[in-house]
Image (cartoon, grey):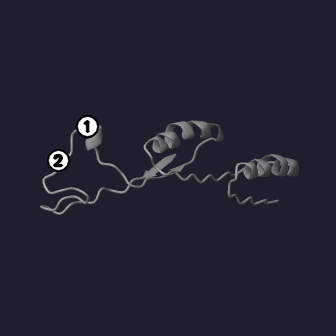
Amino acid sequence: MIKAEIPEKPEVEKGKPEEGKEAGEEVAEGEEGKPRRRRVTISIEAPDGRLADISRGVIKPLKDEGADVKVEVSIEAKGEISEHTLKMNVKETLQQLGTKFKLEEND
């Protein structure tokens, strides 16, 4: 499930130019003439194997446009997970990546 919240472009009062535009200024047709968004929030629920695809198909294009992208990941793992895996793999990797993380261990 992908849910994108895209703020609507504010309506401009008749006779007043849009912010940052001169009265009577025209926008060229084509890609540059399409409305641009200042902020987009996307919530994604996807299988774990799709993370690379999300990075390549969602995050990279946004960064290529010059967007400042912040990613928050929530992982829920159920099953018999060893203390070794949590300490030596999960925590170690997150620390090496320099991420801020909170790990909740529920018995």
- Depth check, mark 2 against mark 1: the one in front is 2
Total numbered circles: 2
User: Quadrant of the image for the C terminus?
Assistant: bottom right
The front one of 51 and 94 is 94
* Residue at image mark 2: 26
Q: Amino acid at mark 1?
A: Gly
* Quadrant of the rendered image containing residue 49: top right
Q: Residue at x 75, y 52 (%)?
A: 95
Residue 78 seen: no
Tell me: 98 left or right of 20: right
Q: Position of residue 62 (x, y in %)?
A: 46, 44
Q: Which mark is residue 30?
A: 1
Kind of element beneath mark 1 = loop
Category of crowding for the residue at label 2, using alpha-carbon neighbours closer than 10 angstroms: few (below 14), some (14–19), many (at least 20): few
> What's the distance in space between the residues labelled 2 and 1, CA to CA?
13 Å
* Quadrant of the rendered image containing residue 51: top right
Q: Position of residue 21 (x, y in %)?
A: 22, 56
Tell me: 43 left or right of 102: left
Tell me: 42 left or right of 33: right
> Is residue 12 placed above or below 94 in the rendered structure?
below
Q: Residue at x 54, y 36 (%)?
A: 56
Q: Amino acid at mark 2?
A: Glu
Q: Residue at x 18, y 59 (%)?
A: 17
**Do the residues under discs 2 and 1 have CB atoms within 8 angstroms?**
no
Q: Position of residue 80 (x, y in %)?
A: 83, 48
Residue 96 seen: yes
Kind of element beneath mark 2 = loop
